């Protein structure tokens, strides 16, 4: 294809991607590569919202499994996403991409509060909008936050950038005979209990006819290829929704 296949996208980026080859933290070289790829896509005329996780700093569910009170741990995880979002905003602006950072938690010194109409206005003015702090509520993942924001802003698709090149019938790191799906329905993904996104995110995307593409964003250039409609990764799509 010669140009973007989508008008408006929601990119879900895991916090672990920012760590690069490290277990924790932010690797500047990786951060700036992602920023440049986002800018290239945005410069091609695509409106972009981004939700980024916080797993490279703190994951709420992991904290609760180690004895922390779940809601308290989840709020800490939300704050971790704000740190990552600030880092990504800085990198994007250093490569010349105008951004707005909106938080579901009120931290006015560093983020705008999330207001849907304001987010829509920023997108229409050509700014990349980064959505931080999940939904602002404990017990909800950033996958669910990404799906919620995608529905609210009227995104054409959710692009989930991971270290894996799609959705498999079983863990490809453990099983050599794992088979990758090129296409699967939301309902089948739920029935097969494929651990790519939580069931709330899958259900919400299915109810709103929001397709999801899971792809390997660690490979340079893949983000632009996916946006241009190249068959990369796995698309999760409702039977009533046809791919753009």
Image (tube, rainbow, N blue to C red):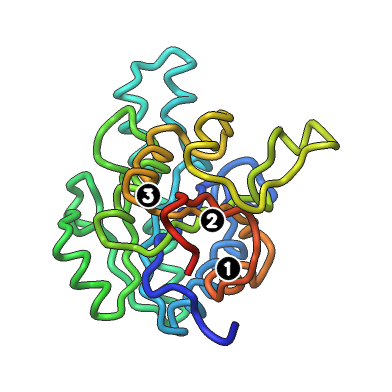
Give the residue at mark 3.
Answer: 146
Give the residue displayed 33% in from the left and 43% down from the top.
Answer: 207
Please name the residue shown 20% across and 49% down the image: 107
| Closer to the eye: label 2 or 3 | 2
Mark nearer the N terminus (2 vs 3)? 3
Q: Is residue 67 above or below residue 127?
A: above
- Dividing the picture into quarters, in which one does residue 60 lie? top left
Most distant residue in the top direction:
67
* Label 3 element class: helix
Kind of element beneath mark 2: strand
Depth check: 177 or 49 in front?
177
10 Å crowding of disc 2: few (<14), some (14-19), many (20+): many
Q: Is residue 77 above or below residue 233?
A: above
Q: Residue at x 24, y 55 (%)?
A: 152
Which percent across, then down, holds residue 66? 49, 15
> CA–CA distance between discs 2 and 1?
8 Å
Q: Residue at position x 51%, y 48% from top?
A: 14
Q: Is residue 237 above or below residue 141?
A: below
Inter-mark Cα distance, 2 to 3: 13 Å
Q: Earlier in the sequence, mark 2 or mark 1?
A: 2
Question: Residue at label 1?
Answer: 226
* Residue at which label 2 appears: 213
Q: Residues within 10 Å of mark 1 (few under 14, many from 20)?
A: many
Q: Are marks 2 and 1 in contact (CB under 8 Å)?
A: yes
Q: Indicate the position of residue 96 as horizontal and vertical percent values.
A: 42, 82
Q: Nearer the viewer, mark 3 or mark 1?
A: 1
> Quick one: label 3 or label 1, which is nearer the N terminus?
3
Q: Is 101 displayed left or right of 177 in the figure?
A: left
Q: State the separation of the CA atoms marked 3 and 1.
A: 18 Å
Crowdedness near tag 3: few (<14), some (14–19) or many (≥20) residues, C-alpha within 10 Å: many
Q: Nearer the viewer, residue 4 or 104?
A: 4
């Amino acid at each position: 294809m010669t140009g973007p296949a989508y008008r408006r996208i929601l990119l879900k980026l895991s916090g672990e991607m920012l760590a690069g080859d490290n277990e924790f933290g932010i690797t500047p070289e990786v951060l700036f590569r992602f920023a440049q790829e986002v800018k290239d896509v945005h410069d091609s005329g695509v409106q972009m919202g981004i939700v980024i996780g916080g797993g490279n700093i703190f994951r709420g569910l992991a904290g609760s499994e180690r004895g922390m009170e779940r809601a308290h741990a989840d709020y800490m995880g939300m704050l971790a996403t704000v740190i990552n979002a600030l880092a990504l905003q800085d990198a994007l602006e250093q490569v010349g991409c105008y951004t707005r950072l909106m938080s579901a938690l009120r931290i006015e010194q560093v983020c705008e509060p999330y207001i849907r109409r304001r987010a829509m206005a920023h997108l229409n003015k050509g700014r990349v909008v980064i959505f931080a702090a999940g939904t602002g509520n404990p017990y909800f993942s950033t996958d669910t936050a990404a799906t919620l924001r995608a529905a609210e802003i009227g995104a054409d698709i959710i692009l989930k950038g991971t270290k894996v090149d799609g959705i498999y019938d079983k863990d490809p790191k453990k099983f050599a005979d794992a088979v990758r799906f090129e296409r699967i329905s939301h309902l089948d993904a739920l029935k097969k209990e494929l651990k790519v996104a939580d069931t709330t995110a899958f259900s919400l995307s299915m109810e709103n006819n929001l397709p999801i593409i899971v792809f390997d964003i660690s490979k340079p250039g893949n983000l632009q290829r996916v946006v241009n409609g190249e068959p990369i990764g796995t698309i999760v799509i409702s039977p009533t929704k046809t791919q753009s």
